[in-house]
Amino acid sequence: MILIVDDDPSVVASLALVLKQAGYKSDSASTPKQALQMIGGNDFELVLQDMNFSRQTTGAEGLDLLKEIKAKKPSLPVILITAWGSIPLAVQGMRNGAADFITKPWTNPQLLQSVKTILSLAATPPERESRELNRSALDASYDFRSIIGTDTKLLRTLEVLGRVSATDASVLITGESGTGKELVAEAIHKNSPRRNGPFVKVNLGGISTSLFESEMFGHVKGAFTDAHQSRRGRFEIADGGTIFLDEIGDLPAPSQVKLLRVLQDRTYEVLGSSASRTVNVRIVSATNRNLPELVSGGEFREDLLYRLNLIAVHLPALRERAGDIPQLAQHFLTSIAAVYRRSGLSITPAALGWLQNREWPGNVRQLRHLIERAVLVSSSDELRPEDFLHTLEMEAVGAPRESIPAPGSMTMDEMERAMILRCLQHYSGNITRVAESLGMSRAALYRRFEKFGIKP
């Protein structure tokens, strides 16, 4: 049963009809007082609540009602209904425990998608949270073949992923560079009802503000000087499937505003056209940055953050699950052996122990690349600690053996710029290798290029 709280009879009738046609039962309340009375005497599964009542336009009454609902029944999910211009009010509601918010005028598919997602997430049996996690049981229920490991932290993450994959909930994946955020995004798609639809990956850190609309929403012929032909945007390509927004924390402020609108009501306009288009996509995003800190510093929109992280999933760093390194190493060795046609490759126990004791600032990606380079360099089919050490020493060959600058001779920025230039020279301009050696993402490296005026 869903409770509709709104003082406009036409809105209540419209919502009730939409819910009934979708197979949901509903009841309604026209005032906060009536809503609280009904909630106290009934087992509602969800509340659809307007933010303004009577002549109130500030939303204070709606926020007070939300707080009282959450105080009375903390586990009862509430979806707020507000006007587009009142999104800051909805953001306050999210801070106070609302599960989601939709804006007027809403579309029925958008409304029902939110209702279905919230009810699905709220229906998880409590006993599942306390049971002992087992990799075999997870693999029997979900397709996580691409994600290697049995560490408890990883299994908790996979359990959450399995549950949310079946919904259309927006998922925000956080974690250090190289932890496998893209693999997780693909796993969400593979385990979802959208698995037969497209999976579109977008590195937002590599799209300039001037090209954002064209890349994401497409353009028509003649929309700008070099638009010699029409082009489909990423959202159109992803229609019916999942769009993966990688490096979301690197998105410039002007682009954040444009992205928010399409995430809010699933509509957009192709550059050069005034006609609105509707898109049916699931949003999965990822970042290695701390978005709440960016919000506090005014670098990231709080309303966009709430649109992205209905469900937040954090991937542990490799050093936090060192017990998975032997399994990961064997997995990588097997795939590398197939690529280079070298059967019979193995890693000695001593080498595995050496690998487990490293910090791995580049995480899983760095581990794979070190193993691959060791395979290429070593003449033996059995990799020992010295093979990995030799690989690291070879990487350092050719790097200038300059002494550490004297105190005060260089600023931190000058030292950072010098290190980037050395790595660019050492790796012959290979951006991926440079980023890995410095322990940062490609997007972060490009930001340094722009900051220091480096042209790779």
Image (cartoon, helix red, strand yellow):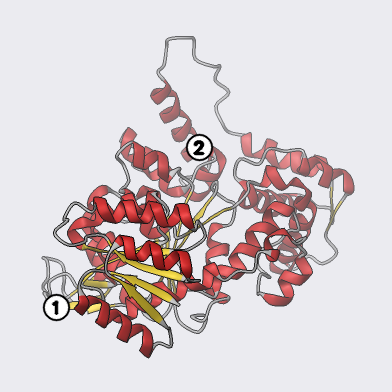
User: Where is mark 1, residue-wise?
Assistant: 275
Residue 369 position (above or below residue 263): above
Residue 236: give its label: none
Which percent across, then down, holds residue 3? 38, 72
Q: Is residue 72 left or right of residue 249?
A: right
The N terminus: image quadrant = bottom left
User: Where is mark 2, residue-wise?
Assistant: 423
Q: Is residue 392 visible?
A: yes
73 or 84, which is in the foreground?
73
Q: Residue at x 63, y 46 (%)?
A: 317
Q: CA distance from mark 1 to mark 2?
A: 48 Å
175 or 404, which is in the foreground?
175
10 Å crowding of disc 2: few (<14), some (14-19), many (20+): many
Q: Residue furthest right?
A: 349
Q: Which amino acid type is shown beneath numbered disc 1?
A: Ala
Q: Residue furthest bottom?
A: 21
Q: Residue at x 32, y 46 (%)?
A: 300
Q: Is residue 163 left or right of residue 154?
A: left
